[in-house]
Image: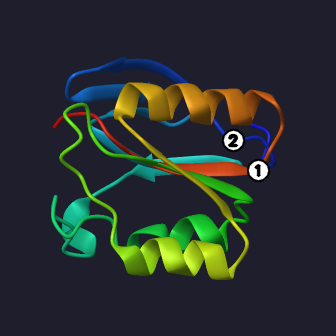
Amino acid sequence: MDQTQSPLITDLNWGRMVVQGVGGGKDFKLWPGGGRVWDWRETGTCHRPGIQPADIQELLDNGCQAIVLSRGKLRRLQTCQETLDLLESRDIAVHVAETDKAVEIYNDLAESGLAVGGLFHSTC
């Protein structure tokens, strides 16, 4: 995989995603040149209060100019205000959307060549 291109999400179903060059899994962290399964236990993430600054640090460390945060298919995953504030302070464009829409936004940005990253939750 090109180390500057963000990997595309090639398949999405309830509880399962497939990412180009990364493989399959339930939830993912993606960035230019790669990604990995997103294990919520690493930072103690839960639906509320949601995505924390620690969850996006790896995306920032990998040079993302824009970040897509999925809310889950039923929109149950929240995003902490501190996370949004951090992205704003670094002038990083952020998109927060239901998972199907988030994947669409992410893939469009990745195909345009933008250094985009994202956090994707494939269930609720």
Q: Amino acid at mark 1?
A: Ala
Res 115 label:
1
User: 66 or 14, which lies in front?
Assistant: 66
Q: Secondary structure at mark 1?
A: loop
Q: Is residue 113 left or right of residue 29?
A: right
Place residue 72 in its image quadrant: top left
Task: Tell me the residue at 61%/47% (across/down).
Answer: 34
Is residue 73 in view from this perspective? Answer: yes
Task: Tell me the residue at 26%/72% (across/down).
Answer: 42
User: 21 or 66, which lies in front?
Assistant: 66
Place residue 45 in its image quadrant: bottom left
Q: Is residue 96 left or right of residue 117?
A: left
How far apart are the two marked residues, 2 and 1, measured between alpha carbons?
6 Å
In this figure, which residue is indicated by the disc labeled 2? 6
Q: Which quadrant is home to the N terminus? A: top right
Q: How many marks?
A: 2
The percent coordinates of residue 113 (x first, y second) are: 84, 37
Q: Which quadrant is home to the C terminus? A: top left
Against 17, residue 13 (above or below) is: above
The percent coordinates of residue 24 (x first, y second) are: 37, 30
